[in-house]
Image (tube, helix red, strand yellow):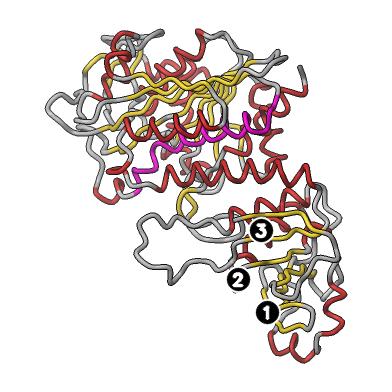
Amino acid sequence: MEVRAANTDVDMSDATVIVGVMEGLEALPGSELLDEVDPDLLSAAGFEGKTGQIAKLPHSEASALLLIGLGDEVSFASIRAASGDAVRKVKTERAVTLLAQASVEGATRAVVEGSILGAYQFRTYKSDDDDALDVSSVDVVGADQSSLDAAVITSTATALARDWVNTPARDKAPEYFASMIETEAIAAGLGAEVWDLQRIEEESLGAVLGVAAGSDRDPRVVQLTYSPSGAETHLVLVGKGITFDSGGLSLKSAASMEEMKDDMSGAAVVAAATIAIAELGLKVKVTCITPITDNAVGGDAIRPGDVLTPVDGPTIEVLNTDAEGRLVLADGLGLAKALEPDLIVDVATLTGAAVVALGQKIAAVFGSDSDAAAQILEAASIAGEEFWEMPLFKDYRKSIDSNIADIKNISGSRYGGAITAAIFLAEYAGDGAWAHLDIAGPARARETAGENVKGASGMGVRTLVELARRMAETD
């Protein structure tokens, strides 16, 4: 969908005009258009400006007015959510939105993100267009052009991550998923290197090889590099890329497998964010590392009790083959710390325990220290994504001691699983600044509302882009 900046004199004759209205019909910019509306029409529609209320009315200057309720307080989040809800109700090819004129910091970005992400559709496997949206362009009245351009790039990258995650596992074998990332990265001017099975063996990525052993589809590791002139800070992003997670020999139930095409969300998020960072021209060096493999059941699959040797760090006794994400991340983090960056961030749909702790709309963040976690939380607050800091409680480290190896991949306790998983990863992240983002809950939107559309969410892309922006500004 095309999103453009527009002036107040924009032609509205063939467009649906989106107008924000506060509770009690309090005026916002554009609300003067309501002066020509028969109050009986509003009354009949039951429209009072409450959050989420929508009313569509005829108007002489436009194809129609689409009134969207903002409640009793206007904020960045309410403008973004209203833009997403409204764009899905547009029945014309073009919309004109007046919401960016609201006196809210970041209003232009809120409108662009809401419009692009709210109108997102994954239609690759649809056989007809019966439920396709009509709107193909949105004119944003009063938009700041530079903010609009940046928001389009970040929102498009978020939509790209959604596309990758929503693609069925059958159609994104590690080789193919790696090629999708490589193609998009090269188009954005990034350096891209894809390691095949032979290269992975040569690089001694024993944990990736162990997880991949049960699959008839060879693993891949993708490394993207963005090195702008003048950059003094280096950020390394590591993403979990399990293209389908059966649980391995520690087999999941059928119901638990239904959404396991999502288990490469971390890889999708870090790759899409790196592409957006390059397209925005941010002056921070970024390296992106994504180990990609199936976790399948086969004659060569790793067995509970097997020991794996990652590229660097402790040997691992595998007691549960369904705790495989931390295994591939061990190798990814080992590669990352060898680069000696200023900050490493890994992103993964890692634990159900994070969902139990924080629900399906909040992601967990663990930091090697308070500053590393704070960098994520500050970036997330600006990006408008929900993260909550969890403790890296070192006393739990002894729960993953192994009798026969240096470490085991599960604690054996039903409690504190997100914490012990993070402690496991800390063993491979090195002594530098590191943050772990467990997005298991919000990686998938359970309902369509605001800028979210049921299915893959792309959660984390906007936070990582904002993190890179802030790191670039501190050079």
| Residue 59, image x, y percentages | 76, 82
Answer yes or no: do the residues labelled 3 and 1 have beta carbons within 8 Å? no
Q: Pointer 1: what residue?
A: 56
Measuring 60% from the left and 71% from the top, which residue is drawn there? 89
Q: In the rendered image, which quarter is residue 23 located in?
A: bottom right
Position of residue 440 measured from the top left corner of the image (x, y, whole percent) = 46, 40
Magenta segment includes 28: no
Residue at horizontal 28%, vertical 24%?
211
Q: Amino acid at mark 3?
A: Ala
What amino acid is at disc 1?
A: Lys
User: Please, is residue 223 above or below residue 161 in the view?
Assistant: above
User: Which quarter of the picture shows residue 343?
Assistant: top right
Q: Which residue is mark 2?
A: 89
Q: Which residue is mark 3?
A: 81
State the extent of the magenta-drawn residues as a range.
Answer: 259-282
Q: Residues within 10 Å of mark 2 (few under 14, many from 20)?
A: some
Query: In what quadrant of the picture does the C terminus appear?
Result: top right
SS category of the residue bearing label 2:
loop
The label shown at residue 393 is none
Query: Could one spot residue 49 in this view of the protein?
Result: yes
SS at mark 3? helix
Tell me, yes or no, whether the two marked residues, 2 and 1, touch with CB atoms within 8 Å.
yes
Q: Secondary structure at mark 1?
A: strand
Q: Earlier in the sequence, mark 2 or mark 1?
A: 1
Q: Residue at x 41, y 35 (%)?
A: 180
Q: Nearer the viewer, mark 2 or mark 3?
A: 2
Q: Earlier in the sequence, mark 2 or mark 3?
A: 3
Which percent across, then down, holds residue 157?
56, 41
Residue 339, x across and y down, in percent: 53, 9
Q: Which amino acid does the dot numbered 2 rest on?
A: Lys
